[in-house]
Image (cartoon, rainbow, N blue to C red):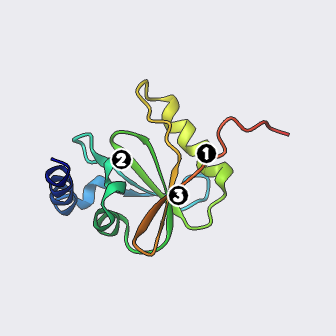
């Protein structure tokens, strides 16, 4: 069953439309956001070829604040900014995921903790 689900995800990523991808800076930081319009955008982190298809092969930090939103931030982006952005999106979604970030490098996804619940100095 897992293989079938991943196969379906790969197919959906290949069929994603360019108009579902928005490239626009936020706070001066270049961002690329993907919404599938079917509720599966965040699951793209499970399939490396989906990340390449949607965002390209370059290293990046990805945040998935909700089921249907995956945001690419530049490699080396300030984690404070990434945390703030994730929490801003999450605040508008009663079913927010509150996941950590995902580092995309060399065709591999790995978890990258955000600075959640950090005490401001």
Residue at image location 73% in from the left, 38% down from the top: 118
Categorize mark 2 by other alpha carbons within 10 Å: few (<14), some (14-19), many (20+): many
Q: Earlier in the sequence, mark 1 or mark 2?
A: 2
Marks 3, 1: nearer the viewer: 1
> Distance of mark 3 from mark 2, alpha carbons?
20 Å
Q: Nearer the viewer, mark 3 or mark 2?
A: 2
Residue on which disc 3 sits: 25
Q: Tag 2's secondary structure? A: helix
Q: Residue at x 49, y 41 (%)?
A: 99
Q: Is 58 on the left or on the right of 27, as rendered?
A: left
Q: Which residue is mark 1?
A: 83
| Furthest residue toward right | 121
The percent coordinates of residue 79 (x first, y second) are 65, 53
Residue, x 28% and y 53% (percent of image)?
20
Distance from label 1 to label 2 (Cα)?
16 Å
- Whole-angstrom CA distance, mark 3 to mark 1, is 16 Å
Query: Compared to 86, does 44 lie above or below?
Result: below
Quadrant including the C terminus: top right
Q: Residue at x 29, y 63 (%)?
A: 50
Q: Which mark is residue 42?
A: 2
């Amino acid at each position: 069953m897992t293989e079938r689900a991943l196969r379906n995800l790969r197919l959906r990523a290949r069929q994603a439309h360019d108009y579902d991808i928005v490239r626009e800076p936020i706070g001066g930081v270049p961002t690329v956001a993907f919404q599938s319009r079917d509720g599966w955008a965040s699951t793209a982190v499970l399939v490396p070829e989906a990340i390449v298809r949607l965002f390209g092969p370059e290293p990046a930090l990805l945040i998935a604040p909700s089921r249907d939103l995956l945001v690419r931030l530049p490699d080396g982006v300030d984690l404070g900014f990434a945390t703030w952005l994730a929490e801003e999106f999450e605040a508008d979604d009663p079913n927010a995921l509150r996941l950590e970030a995902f580092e995309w490098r060399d065709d591999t996804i790995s978890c990258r903790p955000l600075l959640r619940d950090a005490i401001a100095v």
